[in-house]
Amino acid sequence: MAIHRTTIDRLPDAERQEVAAILQEFAQQRQQFTSRFCSDEGDSLAFHLLLGLAALGGLIAGVVEQVPADIARDFRAGAVDGILWSLRRPTVLGFAAAAFVLPWTIAVFLRVHRRCGWAVTSFAVMRVYGRRIRLLRFADIASAERRKVGTRRPFSVLEMTATNGKRLTTYATPLMPAILARVPGSTDRS
């Protein structure tokens, strides 16, 4: 399998240290990209931000509607029917869902903040998402093609094809020259 899904911790020591150095260099800077890492955190975490805001709104609405007091009253009553009835009410169900979703969203954000994007190392190009990575070694890249996509506001994409035919596509424009320089026979139609 040419595109490996793994974690940073499972890389060999030298490779793990190089990736850690790249991420550390990026974390110390206040830019969206460095020469070896390009963050797409804004794009990747937009859904999580929206989900977190919805969960926060659900918690606030539940407190305003005094849902925690209703749940406590039903629970103290000890009646299974009372608890099941309270779960059928949309306000209670929404409050319960928001109470689980908000901490999960915060945990995801803390895990991937400043660790979400594309990295170019001496041995591979990789998609980083927290501790997880999708890794395509330069030796396994059969071809790489940079092209423009879109008509109104075109942007560049780099599509890398692995030796097994699978593809990895990046929109990290600042890293494209570094990747193309390492791939023999690559094309640039931008």
Image (tube, rainbow, N blue to C red):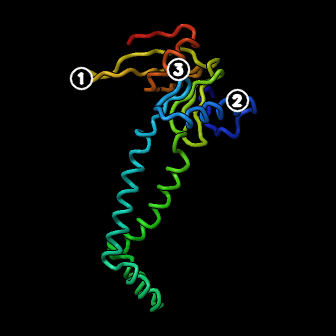
3 vs 19, nearest the viewer:
19
Which residue is at the far right? 13
Which residue type carries mark 3? Answer: Thr
Q: Quadrant of residue 20?
A: top right
Question: Residue visible at 26% across and 21% down?
Answer: 151
From what the image shows, is residue 182 above or below residue 81? above
Instruction: Name the residue type under label 1.
Output: Arg
Q: Secondary structure at mark 3?
A: strand
- Sooner in the amino-acid sequence: mark 3 or mark 2: 2
> Which image quadrant: the C terminus?
top left
Q: Residue at x 27, y 23 (%)?
A: 153
Callout 2 amino acid: Glu
**Mark seen at residue 15:** 2
Residue topped by disc 1: 152
- x, y percent for residue 58: 35, 66
Q: Position of residue 135 (x, y in %)?
A: 60, 30
